[in-house]
Image (cartoon, grey):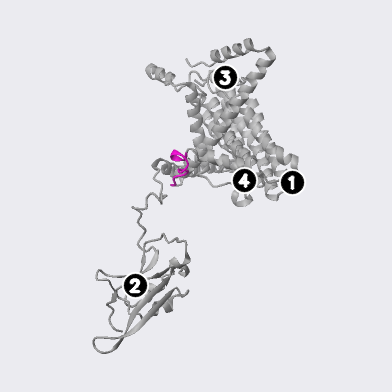
Amino acid sequence: MYDFSPLIASFTSLLEKTFSPFWAGAVSMVMLGVAVLTFYAVLGLYLVYAERKICARMQNRIGPNRVGPMGLFQTVADLIKLLLKELIYIRNADAFLFNVAPFIVIVASIMAIGSIPFARGLQAVDLNIGVLYILAISSMGVIGILVAGWASNNKFSVIGAMRSGAQVISYELSVGLALLGVITFAGSMQLSEVIASQQDGWWIFKGHIPAFIAFVIYLIAGTAETNRGPFDLPEAESELTAGFHTEYSGIKFAFFFLAEYMNMFIIAALATTLFLGGWLPFHLYEWDAFNRLMDFVPPVIWFFGKTALVIYLMMWFKWTFPRLRIDQLLTLEWKYLLPINLMNLLLISFLTLMKWHF
Amino acid sequence: MALLNTFKETCDYLREIWSGVGSLLKGMHVTGTYFLRGDGVTQQYPENRDQLRMFDNFKGELILIHDENNQHSCNACNSCARKCPNGSIEVASVRVQGDDGRSKRVLEKYTYHLESCTFCGLCVPACDQHALAFGQTFEHAVFDKAGLTKILNKPGSTSKAKDE
């Protein structure tokens, strides 16, 4: 049920019949690109809206409620405003790097979306090293941030960018090691196979406590890697005005803003795929009627539901915890998360070796 | 001994993590309950204009209290105007012959300059006759500055103030 691969295969064969092989490839690439870009823009806008609504409720406010019903078009209006705004050129900035930086950030996050499995067969590329690819590509974004900070020729921007560099380089370790736990369980880095290995239960349940610890560490480190609160030191409004994007205006600022939210989505989607069973429905052991009912819910809804849950957790973190100092940030990583993570990985390897997971 | 110390340090390390996670969860509990309850304290101002009640000691504007007989209790002693740091109050009075044949000071025109009032509230306790109070209205925006100068005694009103 709900398999997208026949649909996509018939579409591909249709393209191949109509065009020469070269043009069929080109057309499918363009269509895929348009689909991913549209998805990116719409999802980015509505993540911003969700964030504003959720943070408002957590602070006993109402949030955007004037533009459209319940303020649904507020972020669309904001985007139109940003599109129409003047792009200010900084006189002493390095013009080339200054202009190219937002594109590095946004291209990194768009490329990562390409290999996220939304449903069976609904995945742009199914690489055999999918996890490694997403980790590698999404950490390219920090180069854009460093470039933005450097090219702005502004002390706040440079400080923000350097903080971001230090933060992403240290937390990359924790993200990688936490995911390595699941890779050890699943025995594959291919995202479709990791999902297939969770057919009889998600890794967060099957992997006992170590998988749960890995999940929590992944959430913490993932939040840090997207530069979100409580790890938003690169932006730190109260200290650095806006950090690396202080000097940016108009659509270039919007690129940074959207990329932050999309990185959050990618982190959440990866958590969903590896820990929460991806697009697989929720099954309870031997409750056949219940399981059948769960199967009727389309996998896309399962995927987005789980991702929304993880995103909600990350927003909950942001609007609850105060920002860490840079030394506290590095202490948390190197003195707490990393040792715990290494011990946890050892435990997971042992569990896998003894086949003690379900 | 060294082993004991190492053991102690490890215990402290673990306890630190435990208490840290505990306090984080406590914070998340607070915001989580706010999220679930979702009763925002934000007022939807233009929509709830009819139901909007300001709190008791809200200082909207200065008013001269009039009773149902259109009588106020100002005896034009001018102490409110003297207390006012900005000179926002002007009390114009006339002397009239009272019933008992003595000359009596009567309020003619109580001018209140809302545009220069800082709502410090010194005028209200300065009044011996308790003639003044602060009203609850706050929508004072006007197109012309002259609209902010208000005459507080209503037309045709008389004073019920006792003689000083």
Disc number for residue A93: 1
Mark on residue A192?
A: 3
Tell me the element at label 3: helix
CA distance separating discs 1 and 4: 19 Å
Residues indicated by labels 2 and 3 sit on the same polypeptide chain: no
Q: Which of the labelled discs sits on residue A235, or is there none? A: 4
Give the side of residue B122 with respect to residue B3, left or right: left
The residue stretch that appears in magenta: A60-71
Q: CA distance from mark 1 to mark 3?
A: 45 Å
Q: Is residue B67 above or below residue A321?
A: below
Mark 2 on the same chain as mark 4: no
Q: How many other residues sit within 10 Å of disc 4, few (<14), some (14-19) or many (≥20)?
A: many
- Say whether disc 1 or disc 4 marks the residue closer to the N-terminus: 1
Disc 2 to disc 3, C-alpha distance: 82 Å
Q: Is residue B7 visible?
A: no
Say which quarter of the image contains residue B79.
bottom left
Specify the quadrant of the image occupied by residue B105. bottom left
A105 vs A285: above or below: below
The three-letter code of the residue at mark 2 reads Asn
Say which of A230 and A32 sits in front.
Answer: A32
Tell me what residue is drawn at x 68 percent, y 33 percent: A140
- Mark 3 residue type: Ser
Residue A49 spot, x, y in % from top left: 51, 39
Residue A310 visible here: yes
In this view, the residue in front, B9 or B23, is: B23
Counting residues from the N terminus, which is met first, the one under dot 1 or under dot 3?
1
Between circles 1 and 3, the one closer to the viewer is: 1
Q: Is residue A288 left or right of residue A266?
A: left
